[in-house]
Amino acid sequence: MSVKALILTGFGINCDRETALAFEMAGAETDRVHLNDLAEDPARMAAYQILAIPGGFSFGDDVASGRILANRIRHRLGAPLQEFVTAGKLAIGICNGFQVMVKMGLLPLFDGDFTQEVTLTHNNAGRFDNRWVNLNVDGATSCIWLKGMETLEVPIRHGEGKFIARDEPTLEKLRSQGQVVLRYATARGAHAEGKFPENPNGSVDDIAGICDPTGRIFGLMPHPEAFLHHTNHPRWTREVLPKEGAGLQLFKNAVQFARENLT
């Protein structure tokens, strides 16, 4: 039985094709489904092992990035999404998708219910930023998506990517439970320590991505689907790079896990 990934689209999501390509290159079958079509027939979610909420500018980032789409999903698909998560399936939110996840409470999902504990807000620089960043993977993470990975170089493209927690106890809970899985870093692998441009948005503790306690639900601001082939890299004509872009490994990890455990 093949692995099937559901790629959400509509209302300003615009990285759905790249995300679908990433999963296809990793060996999955994909369907790009508009939110309205899914809301009309939510039972169709049961046919998939992986859900992806891609990047983009849903609803024009009105109110706050991801807020309106988060409310739409929560109120129209809350119950089937809860069933999807409870069934042990996988989900990823990238950039705007990460903003959606945290604002609807799908991450960090401390107690299994959709409660907002963290957010992503305006970059310290006060502007949209598009640049490549270096990331460190937490060595103790149980995040399925990052299995076997230590570092990652991919682009960011956002104006509201500054990660903050509700309070210090919430932040400490994320750390102690191993849910902080990606941090912005220097080119030499040291933590960015909040310094621009290595930390492009001012995220607390250099946080670029988190997962739920099981390691199955994952959100990150950088775009792994934007580095699938060496020609995606800005220095591909000046450096010898592996043919496979570093971002593809995340999707391979997810598809492999789903194939071994969910099909």
Image (tube, rainbow, N blue to C red):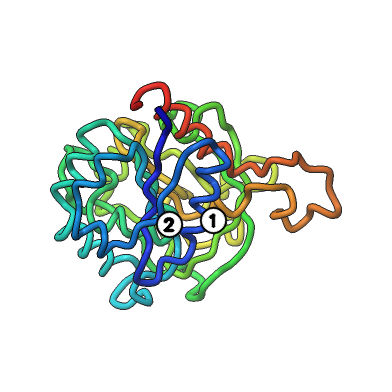
Disc with the residue nearer the chain's start (2 vs 1): 1
Binning the other alpha carbons within 10 Å of mark 1 as few (below 14), some (14 to 19) or many (20 upward) gives: some
Residue 117 pos. (x, y %): 23, 51
User: Residue 163: image x %, image y %?
Assistant: 39, 56
Image mark for residue 49:
none
Q: Amino acid at mark 2?
A: Pro
Foreground residue among 43 and 123: 43
Instruction: Work out which quarter of the rendered image holds the N terminus and state it.
Output: top left
> Residue lying furthest front in this view?
1
Q: Quadrant of residue 56?
A: bottom left
In the picture, measured across the screen, residue 201 lies left or right of residue 118, that is right
For badge 1, the amino acid type reads Glu
Q: Nearer the viewer, mark 2 or mark 1?
A: 1
Q: Position of residue 214 (x, y in %)?
A: 31, 30
Q: Residue at x 47, y 70 (%)?
A: 159
Number of on-image labels: 2
Instruction: List the residue tagged with mark 2.
Output: 54
Question: Where the C terminus falls, by quadrant?
Answer: top left
For residue 107, above or below residue 262: below
User: Do the numbered discs 2 and 1 sit on residues whose CB atoms are within 8 Å?
Assistant: yes
Can residue 54 be seen here? yes
Image-based side of 255 in relation to 117, left or right: right
Image vertical order of residue 99 relative to residue 125, above or below: above
Residue pictured at 59% horizontal, 54% vertical: 226
Q: At 23% across and 51% down in the image, what residue appears? A: 105
Residue at image point 35% right, 59% down: 99
Assign a secondary structure to mark 1: helix
Can you give x and y, in whole percent of width and height, for residue 54 in the image?
43, 57
Task: Tell me if I can see residue 98 in this picture.
Answer: no
Residue at the disc numbered 1 = 18
Extreme-right residue of the structure: 238
Considering depth in this image, is 139 or 239 the residue closer to the camera?
Answer: 239
